Every structure is written in structure tokens, then in C-alpha cells.
Image: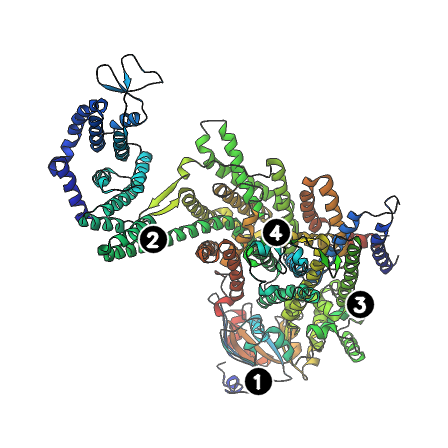
Amino acid sequence: MNEPQDLAALPHAVSTKGLYLDGVSVVFDGFRALNSLSLIVEPGELRAVIGPNGAGKTTMMDCITGKTRPGSGIVRFGDRDLTRMDEASIANLGIGRKFQKPTVFDALTVFENLELALKAPRGPIACLRWVLSGEARSRIEKTMLEIGLTVRAGDLAGLLSHGQRQWLEIGMLLMQDPQLLLVDEPVAGMTDHETEQTAALLVGIAGERSVVVVEHDLEFVKALNSKVTVLHEGSVLSEGSISHVQNDPRVVEVYLGR
Amino acid sequence: MNRRIILLLAVLLLAALPLLNLLPVSNPLHVSDFLVSIIGKWICYAILALALDLAWGYAGILSLGHGAFFALGGYAIGMHLMRLIGPRGAYGHPTLPDFMVFLGYRQLPWFWLGFDWFAFAFAMALIVPGLLALVVGYLAFRSRITGVYLSIITQALTYALMLAFFRNDMGFGGNNGFTDFKELLGMPLANSGTRAILFYASLVSLVLVFLVCARLSVTKYGRVLTAIRDAESRVRFLGYDVTHHKLFVFVLSAMIAGLAGALYVPQVGIINPGEFSPANSIEAVVWVAFGGRGTLVGAVLGAFSVNAIKTWLTSVAPDLWLIVLGCLFIAVPLLLPKGLVGLIRRRKEKP
Amino acid sequence: MFDLALPKLLKAAGRGGILLLGLLLLMAPARAQDFDALVPGLAGTFGEQAEAVERLGSLADPRALPLLQAMSDARLLKLADGSVAIQQGATVPEGASLVRINNRVRVALRGALGRLQLVSPDPAQRLSAADAILRNRSAEDIPILETALARESRPEIRERLELALGGARLASTDAAAKRAGVATLGASSSPEARNLLLAARAANPELSGAIDTAVIAIDKKLQFRQAAETFFQGLSLGSVLLLAALGLAVTFGVMGVINMAHGEFVMLGAYTTVVVQEFCRGIPALQPWSLPLAIPAAFLVTAAIGAAMERGLIRHLYGRPLETLLLTFGVGMVLQQVVRLVFGAQNREVISPAWMMGTMTLPGGVSITQNRAWIILFAIAVLLATLAAIRLTRFGLEMRAVVQNRRIAATMGIRTGRVDAMTFAFGSGIAGLAGVALSQIDNVSPNLGTGYIIDSFMVVVFGGVGSLMGTLIGAFTLGLVNKLLEPYAGVVLAKVLLLVGIMMFIQRRPKGLFALKGRAADQ
């Protein structure tokens, strides 16, 4: 935040098409989970967010997706004020989220999970009258191919392995056709091979859409080869390329201690 | 055997009962009046169980106040039946029901207007529970009151309604409720033909409600409900307005319960505030749990089997019935979490 | 007070022809002499009798009461030596004869008896005498009422005497006495005084101003008393709710286990009280201790059942709250029916110890029933004990540890299963304590608990799940609001309104009054 190059990236009255957070603070029981956090993610950008436990990564996601209302500050997506919207409206705006703990619907099949996520009218009546069109079916099948679950289309999601659930959730995110994807620790519990595949998948997704990845795994972040934001105690400690933040003395101090 | 064929046979068997009732008593196939009337009651209970299963089994809304919707439907039809008594009441007043004359009413309260018309009363039997569910559901779901909190609130709702309906100045007959009905749609209720017609109306309603629920459960809406049941907040992050979806199913369910009540009251010939008792609502929950929730067939099966046990036990060992019912509540979650239907399916899977 | 008392005393002194200073010192011996001199007159001519009765009546000597009573009942004997005695049995001894009286004597007797009863050593007799005088108040009673008032120490009797005195003064023809009567009544705070004043208003136009002032003064006091009594009733209901909800605050609030059988645990506590009482009946030494003994007994019985239920049933359903709800409801149903089969469906009688019976009158005329006052104290004591158990004991520490982080607590060597069972037993035991208290004010019947379960949940949810302070505030708030609403809405509607109000409240604060902060704080 104090570095001139970062300040230059924060114009005051912005109307970017991407995600815009400025001065966001959240206090829980006297604990400052977010402390005047500011962050901009451009359309199509892939951004990695790292930071030690309690740095405010998940709370930041909560603020963007409407799960938590910030005490103060601006959270905008394009020209929409996210602090005034509920989770469902934010999701419909084109912001998708993958949780740290994979949550898919165990009682539904892989296909049905993806079908639910597919961008379509969301009201009760629309759902009652919903008929799966050929186009929709082929989109779902394409996504299943991408996440490697085609053979398990008819299986209940509850029967999938941990890694497969992670992938299914990413697939559901893709079905939502979001403008911005928030991905919380996507490779936790994955094998090295799965981790590589996931990195490739996320890199492939970015470009059309903005992607924010929160991750602990530094190898994975390196593989993403993107701009990195380091959070510490609820605000941005450092921002820049992976080599830039790795050499930032403050980051070194926080991560390695004195 | 095909599941559909079994269900069809079951419906045909039920449909045959009033006909067998017409046979002479000496005939071994003769079915007593008692059996026909009690099965007519169970059919209404089964409709109520379907309503509950829709809300609980599919959307995870465990309502402990569905008896209130059932009772409201019953009261709506009861009001119509009271109006039809006309001057045949004990006081012989041309328009006012007996209890109003007794309580010194000069004229019909405004909310009794229109109930002399069957279509209006029948519509109210669906609309009033639906509206109540809309208001309560909106308040509860909007503030994300879920799980046991919602259960307690719905129980408090039916409890509050019970207290309110016990009051004489509510204009619903207080403690005694409505009874001594004479006729419905020009047919005397004491007539066995009328009772057969009511029986068939209930059976047709049961089949229709079952088909509607079954159809609903296989649409994408049904899958959204299942998703809400299992991971409500995840559904929200997918962009579904969970409040609307839950509200829709809750109102639908309340209206079905109202229908069940409307069919029930002309058959049993009485409705009083006891129908609002929280124990009734929770008894309906055990039908669904015992039969197997989230399966529809289980709800119907549960309503019939638990009530069969009840009818039998209350005649042979009335003191034991509440203990057995309590044990059902205990045993089902522990030993039979998927109910009878789950048991049958498991048997089938094991060769 | 002073300007009233002084003329009263002077008057009393003047009537006896004795100086004020000497009054207290000389009254007793003078009375004794007079008494001995007067008694033979009872057997004299009708004229002498009447005179003797009148004077005995004014003497305020308690010995005269049985004599006059016997005379009035035609059981007074005139013995051969001319002295009198009370007839024992139905026979008249040799040489004696029954004293006969005429109507004039009878009238005199009635008045004298009333006055004598006013100074009787038996408070109940004094009270009924004051009531009798109040009913047919006349100016003649003023002096005796003043004397009685000066000697009376019991507040409830003083109140009646003042009322009678005020009424008697109002009935006098002397303007000054009337004015004093208005003042006396105005100083009291009973609806009867108000009625007396209003009745006198038409007959005494010259006093209307003073009467109006006095009526307003009474109205203010009555309002205060009513408010105080409503407040007390609210506190009482609140304490009952607190007792019923405290156990739930532990099992539901702390453990998150929904126990629909909680009301039945309360009921079992009440039945334990019945059983302990019946057990103590056979042992006279234990009899006065039956209620104190019931307290630990009820705690242990319900705690044991709670522990068994947690270990045997609920444990298997952790994380499945809706199933737990059904299961515990079933347990409640079974418990209720078993109790019904064992003890019968009808109400069981619980005898309250003497120190819990009767009413207490606080200054300002506010009367409260003793048992309810005790229950308020008991509820607060149970709350403090619960707090102490959670905050100060090793068990409380382990319990809080398990609640906050079960896994870490387990790795620290805490046996979480045992802690769960003990916590549930603790909450159930508190329900049993509530049952002991409720047995004193409610009908002990198998469905005693059903009436409380919904209310208790409302208290816990309203106060904020997991906060004992919230439960305390919630219980008393709901109790007070309920009792405040009752006069306007009636008992049933008040309850309905309260339920609706709580539902609306949960809209605004889904986590209750004392929510664990966080999101609620930033909103």
C-alpha cells in the first residue's frame, strides 16, 4: 500500500468494470478481520491472494459475495454496490464462489449439480417449467469433459472423491458463466498431478473472466504466474509479481519471522 | 413388481371399499361403515402427510405447525356447513349459527360473509392456510430462521392459534367449535351415499396431490429444494433466491394441508380448537418419518400404518398408545432413519 | 400524623378524666378495680345490667369478653352469693339461675362485645371486630376505635381500624370530626375508603373539596399499588419462566441439543416433590424438611434420567437436530404417559410448608403471596448456582472447553463424552429444580410441563442462545410484558400477542437479545 507503484494502481473515483474494494473494514467482537482493505481486480485478470491464517482472506470473499456486510468501505463490481445486495443477487450479477470446503449437493447426481448451476432463470416457477434444451445439455457435457467427470455424470455427488468434488465445484462455477470467480483454496487435499491440472484450468478460465484465487500453496501460486496480493492483518501488505512479493522485506518478515 | 402397478392396485383396493360396504352384512366381503369412515379419515391424513413431506422431506422445512393449516382448512369448510344448518339449529335462527345466538350476536360477523357459498368456502380452505404460510414463511425465511428454530416457531404458531380459537369472542364457536352439520351441496351428511362421495373426493384428491408432488419432485424445482435442504447457503451462492423457493413450497404445502382439513371435517362431522393442538402436528410428523421422508409414498404409507396402529391400540390398550407413539418417535430416528420405504428398498437391494 | 394523633390522645385522656401523662401508668390498675366493681352489675336489674355492660365494654379489659359473650349466649349464671359465673355444661347448679336479659341489654351487649373484641389478644378476632364496626359505623365508636388504634401494632388490622375510624368520624355530626374523618380516609389507600368518601360527598357538600383531594390521593396510592402488584406478578411469572428456561439454556443454549422432553423433566421434578413429601409423611421428624429435601432429590432424579437419555439416545443423533427434536419429543411423550399410568391422571396435592403460605403486605399496602416471593428468590439462587457451576468449577471449565472446540478439548485429555453426559444431566437437573418450585404454585399433573416448553424456548431464543444473562433478562422481560398486557388484552390474547411479538423480534435480532456479537454488532 505504501509503495508508489501500488498507489498508482488505485485511482480515486474509479468506474472499472472489474472488482473494486476500497477502505473495507470488518470488525468481529473487537477483532479487526479486515482493516481498510483496498483491492482492484481488472476484467480478465487472474489474481492470487495469499497470506497467513487470519489475514482476512475468507472474510474478504465473504464481503464480496454478500455473506458479510462490511462495517465501512466500498465494495463494487462494475458500477454495482455489492454491500447492498444479498448473496443470490450478487451471484446473479456474475460473481461465483468456490468454498474452501467443497460443497456440492450430495443427494443429486453430477449432472444435476451442474444443471442447477447452469445460468438460467432462477425463480420457482421458472424452475418448475424448466426443460433441459439440447444446447444446455451440450454445455453441461462440455463442462463435464473439462473437469473430467463425464463418466460419472449419473452418479450421486456424495460418492465422489475429495478431488473430484473440488473439480465438480469448479465445474459448477463455470456453469454459472460468471464474470468473476472467487476460488478459495482449490488445491487443498489434491495430489501434485491434480494441482497442476487445476492450475492449468484456472489459467485457461482467466482471460474471459476475472479470477481471484486464495491459496496457501506457494508452488501452486507460482504455477498460476499471475499478479499476487499479500494480505496481512486485514489489509494489503504487498502486491506485485510473485518474485516482487517474495523479495519484499515485509513479506519475508511476516512469513519467516525476524 | 412394478412400483406403479402396486400403487394402482392399492388405489383400486381403496376405491372398492365403499362399494363393498353396499354388500349385505352377511356377505364375507362386506366392509363395515366404521371401516369406510375410518379409512376416509386416513386418506385425509395421508394428504396432510404428503403436504408435510413436501416441505420437510424435500425442502428440509420441519414444520411442527402443519396441523394449524389442516385445522384452518377444516374451519373454513366447517363455517360453510354451519351456514347450511340455517333455521334447523336448536335456536332456530334463520342465519346465525347456534353458538352465535347463544353468545348474543345480533348479526353475522363480517368474516362469516360469503361462507354460505360452497365455492367461496372451499377456496378459503386453501387460501387462508396459504396466506398464513405466506406471512409466517416470509418472516421466517427472510431472516433465515431454519432448522429447529423454525420448528419451534411453527409450533408456537399453532399453539397461539389454539389459544385464540378457544376464545368465544373470536367468533368461531370457542371451545366447542362446530358440529351438528346437516348437509353439504344439498346432500344430507348422515346419508351413506354422501359419505361414499366424500370418500371418493378424498381418494381422488390424494391421488391428484400425490401426482402433483411426484411431478414437482422430478422437475428442476424439486432438485433446487433438495439442494436447499442439504446446503442452503451454497444454493444462495449459486444465485437462487432461497427465500422465494422455500416460500413457494411452504405455501403450496400449507394449501394441501388446508385441502386435507377441508375434506376431513365433513367426514368426521366436527371441528374444534383441539385440532390446533401442537401434539396433532407432531403426530403428523411421525407418520412421515415412520413411512420414510422425501419419498411421498412413505408419507402415505406412514399415515396409514401409524393410524392403523393407533386405531387398533386405542381399542385394545388405550393406555399404551401414547407410549407406543413415543417409542415410534424414539425408534425411527435411531433405527429407521429412512423409514419403512428405506427398509423395503434395502431389502430389495440385498438379494 | 402528629396533628391527628395529638387531639385523639387528648380526647381519650379527657374522657377518662385522667391526665395525659398519667394515662399509660394508671390505666391498668384503674381498669382492674373498675372491672371487679362492675361485674356484679351484670346480674342486677335490666337498667343496672345495661349500665354495667356499657361500662365494661368501654374498659377494654379482655377478661370481660368471655363474660359478655356468655351473657349474650344466655350461659351466664347468677350464683347464690350474688356473684356471676359462666355456665359449664348444660346443667344449672343448685341455687344458681341463668341471667336473663332484655332487648336494651342485648343492644348494649352487641356494641360492647364489638368493642371488646377490638382489644382481644386474638388478631383474627380484632380484625373481624374492626370489620363489623366498619359495616355499621357510627360516631359512638370513635373513642373505642381511637383507643384500639393506639394499641394496635398489626398493619393489616390498623388499616381496617383506620378505615372504620374514618367512616365513624364521617358519620358524626361534628364538622371538625368529619373533616378529621376525611383526612383519615384520605391517608389510607383502599378502594373501600374511596367508596366511603364518595358516598359521603353528596351528604356533605361543604366537604366536597376536601373529599375530592382525598379521593385523588387514594387513587394515586391505588395506582401505585396496582402497578407494584402487576410488577410483582410479572417478576413472579418471570421467575417461573427463568426456572423453566435455565435448564434449557444449558442443554439447548450451551450444547445445542434441542430437548423437547424438557417440560417432562420439570414435571418429574414436581412428582419427585410429591414422592418425597409422601415419604416424609411417615417420619414426623422429617416432615417439616420435605420441601428442602425434595430439592436435591428432584435434581438427582432428573439429572440421572437426563444422563441416561443423553448416553442412551441423544448421543447417536448429534449433528441431526431435527431427528433429535423428534426423539426427545417421543421421550417426553413416554415419560408423561408412564407418570400418568403410575400416579394417575388427576392432580396430586402438594402441601406447602407454613412459611411459604399466606401473603405479605409491603409498605404502601402492596400484598404479595409468600410462595411466589420464595420462588423468585429460589429462581435467582438457581441462576447463581448455575453461573457458579459454569464459571467456577472444573466441570464448568471442561464444559466450556468442549463447547468451544471439541477436538482440541479431546486432545487435552478431556473425556468429551462424559462432559456431554454431565452437561445434559446438569441441564436436566435444573429442570427438576424448576419442578420443585412449580409444584408449589401449579397443579401437579402429568402434563404440567407441556405448558412451559414453548414459553421456555421463547425465553432462550429471545434472550439469545448460549447466554445465561440473556435467559435471565429474557425471562423477566417476557414475564413483565405478559402481565402488563393481561389487564388490557386478557390472559389468552396477551399470550398470543407475546408469541407474535417474539416472532417479530426474531425478525430484527435473529440471534436474540444477547447475541454473541460479530455480525449483529456491525449491523
Question: Subunit of mark 3?
Answer: A
- Classify mark 4: residues with Cα within 10 Å, few (<14), some (14-19) or many (20+): some
Circles 3 and 4 in contact, beta carbons < 8 Å? no
Q: Residue at label 2?
A: C222
Whether tag 3 and tag 2 are in contact, CB under 8 A, the answer is no
Same-subunit check for callouts 1 and 3? yes
**How far is the residue under mark 1 from the one under mark 4?**
62 Å
Q: Position of residue A58 (x, y in %)?
A: 58, 70
- Which is more foreground, mark 2 or mark 1? 2
The residue tagged with tag 3: helix, strand or loop? loop
Disc 4 target residue: B176
Marks 3 and 4, Cα distance to the nearest angstrom?
56 Å
Q: Nearer the viewer, residue B186 or C299?
A: B186
Q: Is residue B256 visible?
A: yes
Q: Is residue C353 left or right of residue C114?
A: right
Q: Amino acid at mark 3?
A: Gly
Q: Specify whether B253 is left or right of A70.
A: right
Q: Secondary structure at mark 2?
A: helix
Mark number displayed over residue A79: 1
Under circle 4, the secondary element is: helix
As measured in the structure, the alpha-carbon distance from the residue carrying label 2 to the one carrying label 1 is 65 Å
Residue sitting at x 57%, y 76%: A85
Q: Amino acid at mark 4?
A: Asn
| Residue at mark 3 | A154
| Near-viewer residue (C69 or B308) | C69
> Measured from the top left, where is residue B67 in percent x and y?
65, 56
Q: Are marks 3 and 4 on the same chain?
A: no
